[in-house]
Image (cartoon, rainbow, N blue to C red):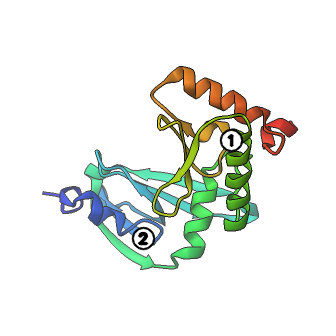
Amino acid sequence: MNEWITKKPLEWQEYVNKEVKVTADEKNTFQGWVFTVDPVSASIVLVNFLDAGKVSVVTVMGHAIQSVEVMNEDGNHTAERLSALFKPANARSYSKDELEQRKSSLKSWLEKNLIPVTEQGSQRDVLCVAGVLTISPPYCPEDCNSSNEIILSRVQSLIKCNPTCEHHKN
């Protein structure tokens, strides 16, 4: 029985953002940075950073994996590079101060429009509207979550009308 395929997802998670050498069936070897491991098939997605900003992505099927050896545990720098690969081109990251400003601005805007809003979460970073809708950072219309589609749609429309919202500037 293949040792790799019998591991649990938390054990596979330990390989994410590390450079590994994978030996597969028929002694094929693959080397790269682990982006993720599929918890159903045990397949590994490897990324290699090439010249001129290009990347190569390879998936090694879980059933074929014979062994996985960690070669490099660079960690933080590589983790940022890997996560940036699959973000939409227009995705933007915000500083803590920017997020606080965005939250404050949105909360004021909602209150100005007589919408009951509170802060919740362990770091009080989630806005809760009328107890039925949440807005997570970075506080854009697509960051709203509610099972009530009517309220969801109306709050998203209201956020788009907020003069400080990036959607308003487009």
Q: Please name whichever residue, 78 or 164, is drawn nearer the observer in this view of the structure.
A: 164
Residue visible at 71% across and 36% down in the picture: 159
Q: Please name whichever residue, 18 or 159, is drawn nearer the observer in this view of the structure.
A: 159
The reply, left or right, for residue 113 in relation to residue 145 is right
Q: Please name whichever residue, 34 or 153, is drawn nearer the observer in this view of the structure.
A: 153
Q: Please name whichever residue, 59 or 102, is drawn nearer the observer in this view of the structure.
A: 102
Kind of residue indicated by mark 2: Val
- Residue 82 in the image, given as x and y percentages of width and height: 57, 61
Badge 2: residue crowd in 10 Å (few <14, some 14–19, many ≥20): many
Residue occupied by mark 1 = 111
Q: Where's the N terminus, which quadrant?
A: bottom left
- Residue 118 in the image, given as x and y percentages of width and height: 55, 48
Residue occupied by mark 2 = 20
Kind of residue indicated by mark 1: Glu
- Residue 133 in the image, given as x and y percentages of width and height: 51, 36
Residue visible at 38% across and 68% down in the picture: 15
Q: Classify mark 1: helix, strand or loop.
A: helix
Residue visible at 47% across and 56% down in the picture: 121
Going from N to C along the chain, the mark reached first, 1 or 2, is 2
Q: Residue furthest left?
A: 1
Q: Classify mark 2: helix, strand or loop.
A: strand
